[in-house]
Image (spheres, coloured by chain):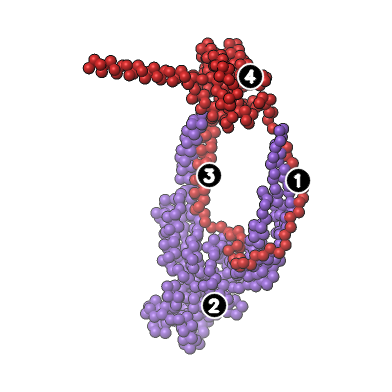
Amino acid sequence: MIKRMLTIPLVFAFCAFLSTSVSAYTEQYVLDYSNSLSYSEIQELESIAGQIEYEYDCCVMFCITTEDASESYALNLYDTYTDNENGLVLIHDIEDEMYYYYITDDAKLQFGADEIAKLQDAYDSNESYFGGIEDYYEVAEYLLDSGEAVVLPDEEIYATGDGLVDRTKNTAKVIVACIVAGMIAGFIIIFAIASKNKSVRMQKDATVYTRPGSFVVTNSYDNFLYKKLDKTPKPKQNNKG
Amino acid sequence: MPTIAEQKCPCCGGGVQFDVGAQKLKCPFCETEFEINQLQQEQVEDTDSINWSAQDNQWSTGETDGMNVYSCQSCGGEIIADSTTGASKCPYCDNPVVMKGQFSGALRPDLVIPFKLDKKAAKEAFKKHLADKKFVPKAFLSDNRIDEIKGVYVPHWLFTCDTFANANFKAAKEKVWSDNNYNYKETSYYEVYRSGNISFDNVPVDGSTKMPDDLMESVEPFDLSQAVDFNTAYLAGYLADKYDVTVEQSMNRANERIRTSAGDALEETVKGYNFIDSRIVNMNITNGFYKYALYPVWILNTSWNGNKYTFAMNGQSGKFVGNLPTDKKAVVIASLLLGAGLSAVFCGLSYLLGWL
């Protein structure tokens, strides 16, 4: 009986230890899916990022990948590796030379568009991946320390591409857009159903009265007239790689 | 006074009618059936030589314009009909009568498609038509009674022709590529010419102003292979009109439909382009001729809320058409409810996608 009484809390304690261990193990700040960084470089960067989180309660992550990333990919990545409500992740898709950001939307500390630009510039301006990420963390620390990472209630900023394309999300605007879209879709569907009450209309053509097999093309030609070329500049390419 | 023809039963003297099921003439009183030609021969032998005429003329000048007065051969009652009515019923004895003069000489139809479906089928089709539709006012459904159901032979002009058509299209091909600095879209425009021959058989045009053109075109098509040579016996028991829209007046409508179909056929041969910007179709019609035919249509009339609603059923195929009233309040409420539901779904999706 005593053994059983001791066993139960021991099992709970062991489970708690395991979960803590796993949690600590999976807490990563620098993710390198392209093998661009060495193990020691990652460890060094992890240490810097860990120190930033410890001091400012802000999880600043960085990811280099060769996979097709996206904004939702960034969100999932951040949620997978941390529960911290304050933070951001910058993903660099080195194959497509695209950048994706995710910034937590309910954070007390947030980075605005200007701050994101500074972070990306810091990364871009260094020739090496390690140096770039190191500069990225340096700027992040500076922004947090100087208070430039401000509180932005109800706003979330994503940036895509190698230029900063900001998409400011406002919860109220999204809700209004959902309601408007829902209402318009509802009216279109119902009016389409109601329009079936009208079945009287003139025929458009006489195709049903075409004599079977009577159609024969006697002459045809296609003459080129002119050409029109539309040229739009691509977003600026990144110089790393 | 214009004369009328009444198909009488040689057995009992009752007025016979065309029976849809048997496709023969049938006496509704003694139920004797007759072949169309058989009865007509007997009728010729038994034709009376009695002619009725009006005793005096009390109509004022111009009052009878567009109106004909007939005398029923069964009961002697006076039948007043407009100048285009070709078959009707005596309002006193209900015997079916055919106004012979309306279909004689140049006015004689070439073909008639006999009714294949009866009044009962028309009623059933009307019920089905109502059952299929949403947002019809409940009051219309519950109070609905058909005021009138009548089988009408509607005059149609049928146009047959060979057509040589040519069409000019402006079509475009798009090509998209990119280099390190730019995205490119090149649109190449072409003048595309197609010409060809195409033939049309029996394109119908409504020859009666009494029947709305859109209603008549909505019950198309009719299967003309089931048409028979015109015989007034087929009109017994139905209403019939002679045409009051001339063939010349009807040609434009036939040409319009033929032109659209010829253009569509030529356009289908234009392939390999991303889009067609414009089209101009010209056509020449050769070997064109027309026929005059009577098409069987059941007309159902009802009124509700001060408005008249007319429905039509193809008396051959059973195709039923007719505009129904719409309950606007129900439409608005349903739209709002569905809109609210969809809004909630969109909000939920936005939340799942992390936009909220």
Which dot marks residue B229? 2
Chain with colour purple in the figure: B
Which element type, helix, strand or loop, lies under badge 1?
A: strand
**Label 3, label 1: how many angstroms apart (C-alpha)?**
39 Å
Q: CA distance from mark 4 to mark 1?
A: 45 Å
Q: Nearer the viewer, mark 2 or mark 1?
A: 1
Q: Nearer the viewer, residue A9 or B280?
A: A9
The three-letter code of the residue at mark 1 reads Lys
Please report contact status of discs 2 and 1: CB closer than 8 Å, yes or no: no
- What chain is tagged by disc 1? A
What's the amino acid at mark 4? Gly
For this rendering, which residue is in front, B335 or A132? A132
Residue at the left extreme, as displayed: A1
Residue on which disc 1 sits: A227
Q: Check the image and name the residue furthest to the bottom.
A: B45
* Above or below B222: residue B232: below
Question: Is residue B156 left or right of B183 when viewed as pictured?
Answer: left
The answer to whether residue A153 is seen in the rendering is: no
Whichever of callouts 3 and 4 sits on the residue coming sooner in the sequence is 4
Q: Which residue is mark 3?
A: A188
Dividing the image into 4 quarters, which one contains the N terminus of chain B? bottom right
State whether residue B347 is above or below residue B191.
Answer: above
Chain identifier of the residue bearing label 2 in the image: B
Residue B77's spot in the image, x, y percent? 46, 77
Q: Chain of mark 3?
A: A
